[in-house]
Image (tube, grey):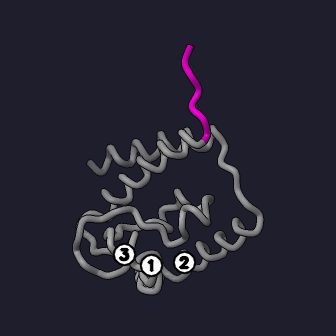
């Protein structure tokens, strides 16, 4: 009998695949925060910890160097400026609006939603490789 994965395990699996997609999508681009060409991580404008509902939103995640992503408390200032340049003012405003709504109302991921996104991002990663 096949064991069903827990929601946290599904979310972790999806996060790994999603992060790989972001690194592949942004390969060859500079760090969104400092502009240097370095090895990229998947850096989120709205943090995964505080804005779980936006953790898999492509407009919220971009290639970011480890220094900016993990060690620079001021990185979001440049991230915001460069994010508007990458996704446009309209998408940026929509992202801010969604962050406000999700922060107020909360969000719970469903098993089917996570499984569907895992399949989607596996395919996207495959296409970029």
Q: In the drawing, what numbered circle is on residue 68?
A: 3
In whole angstroms, how far apart are the C-alphas of marks 3 and 1? 14 Å
In the picture provided, is 80 more to the left or to the right than 34? Answer: right
In whole angstroms, how far apart are the C-alphas of marks 1 and 2? 7 Å
N-terminal-most mark, 1 or 2: 1
Which numbered mark, 3 or 2, is in the foreground of this view? 3
CA neighbours of label 3 inside 10 A, class few (<14), some (14 to 19), many (20+) = many
Q: Are marks 1 and 2 in contact (CB under 8 Å)?
A: yes
In whole angstroms, how far apart are the C-alphas of marks 3 and 2? 20 Å
Q: Secondary structure at mark 1?
A: helix
Say which residue appears at 41% left-offset and 47% top-offset: 17
**What is the span of residues highlighted in magenta in the rendered image?**
1-7
Magenta span includes 85: no
Q: In the drawing, what numbered circle is on residue 83?
A: 1
Q: Is residue 117 visible?
A: yes
In the picture provided, is 129 more to the left or to the right than 42? Answer: left
Q: Is residue 79 visible?
A: no
Say which residue appears at 63% left-offset and 39% top-offset: 111
In the picture provided, is 52 more to the left or to the right than 24? Answer: right
Q: In the drawing, what numbered circle is on residue 92?
A: 2
Q: In the drawing, what numbered circle is on residue 110?
A: none
Q: Are marks 3 and 1 in contact (CB under 8 Å)?
A: no
N-terminal-most mark, 3 or 1: 3
């Amino acid at each position: 009998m096949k064991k069903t994965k827990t929601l946290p395990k599904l979310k972790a699996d999806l996060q790994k695949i999603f992060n790989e997609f972001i690194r592949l999508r942004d390969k060859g681009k500079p760090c969104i925060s400092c502009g240097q060409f370095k090895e990229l991580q998947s850096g989120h404008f709205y943090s995964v910890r505080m804005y779980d509902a936006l953790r898999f939103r492509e407009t919220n995640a971009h290639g970011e160097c480890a220094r900016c992503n993990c060690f620079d408390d001021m990185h979001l200032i440049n991230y915001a400026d460069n994010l508007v340049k990458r996704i446009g003012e309209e998408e940026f405003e929509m992202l801010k609006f969604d962050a406000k709504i999700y922060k107020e109302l909360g969000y719970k991921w469903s098993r089917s939603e996570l499984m569907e996104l895992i399949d989607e991002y596996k395919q996207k990663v495959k296409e970029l490789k």
